[in-house]
Image (cartoon, rainbow, N blue to C red):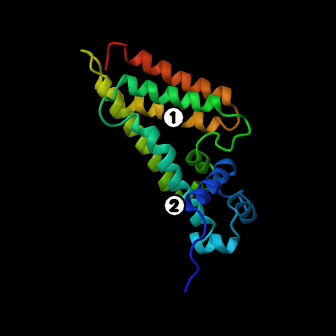
Amino acid sequence: MGRLQSFDRTTVVQAARDLFWDRGFDMVSLAELEDATGLRRSSIYHAFGSKRGLFDAAVEDYQVTVIRPRLRTLTGAGIGRTSLLTYFTELRSAVAALPEDSPRRGCLLVNCAAGLAGHDDLARQVVDGYRSDLTTALQDALRAADTLPGTRLDRAPERARTLASLGLSAMLLARVNATESVALLDTAIEQIRSWLPEDTA
């Protein structure tokens, strides 16, 4: 009979998530994962199969606890100018509030794009899926807000790509230059205000 799991899975996954978020998949050693999670490597292998299995669990936790709640601002009922501004304002506040030594600077998935996703198909799919979901959500919110007579709905795809690029670039820069990251998010906010007058949805 196998041994019963005697640790809190969420606590372990989130401890590993913060380590991967801070240092990337390739730079994290099993010894560091043991220290961060409090598990021996045999327990890590037993519970997650491998370092990569633990990383995949950390990415899923990140999507559930960070990415999806953020994207909910841009989806569902009431999307439009206000939801676009809220999304980028909240992202700006999160970047500005983090201390320089926080392991949660930037975005785990964007950080992953510069390393593991460059040579791993599954990681590439996850990162590109996030980019696609973000761009689609931005495009839907832009279309919902673009209600004035004479406005051009066909501009929504390119504007969504512009906003997604600003957001993703800001998340990458948040690790090395938080001031410039905030400036990029301010640029996104000003773009939204220039494209969508206050009396749009």
**Residue 85 drawn at (x, y percent):** 44, 24
The type of residue carrying mark 1 is Ser
- The quadrant in which residue 29 appears is bottom right
Point 51% across, 60% down: residue:
121
Point 68% across, 58% down: residue:
26
Taking 20 as reference, is 106 above or below it? above
Mark 1 → mark 2, Cα distance in angstroms: 22 Å
Residue 119 visible in the current orientation: no
Taking 62 as reference, is 54 above or below it? below
The type of residue carrying mark 2 is Asp
Q: Of 8 and 94, which appears nearest the observer?
A: 8
Point 32% across, 13% down: residue:
199
**Residue 82 drawn at (x, y percent):** 39, 23
In this picture, residue 124 sits left or right of residue 152:
right
Badge 2, how many Cα within 10 Å: few under 14, some, many 20+? few
In this picture, residue 12 sits left or right of residue 31:
left
Residue highlighted by disc 1:
165
**Residue 98 drawn at (x, y percent):** 66, 34
In this picture, residue 106 sits left or right of residue 151:
right
Q: Of 158 and 20, which appears nearest the observer?
A: 20
Point 57% across, 69% down: residue:
48
The local secondary structure at tag 2 comes to helix
Task: Check if mark 1's residue and mark 2's residue have beta carbons within 8 Å.
Answer: no
Taking 177 as reference, is 35 above or below it? below
Q: Looking at the figure, which quarter contains the C terminus?
A: top left
Residue highlighted by disc 2:
121
- Residue 33 shows which numbered tag? none
Of labels 1 and 2, earlier in sequence is 2
Q: Looking at the figure, which quarter contains the N terminus?
A: bottom right
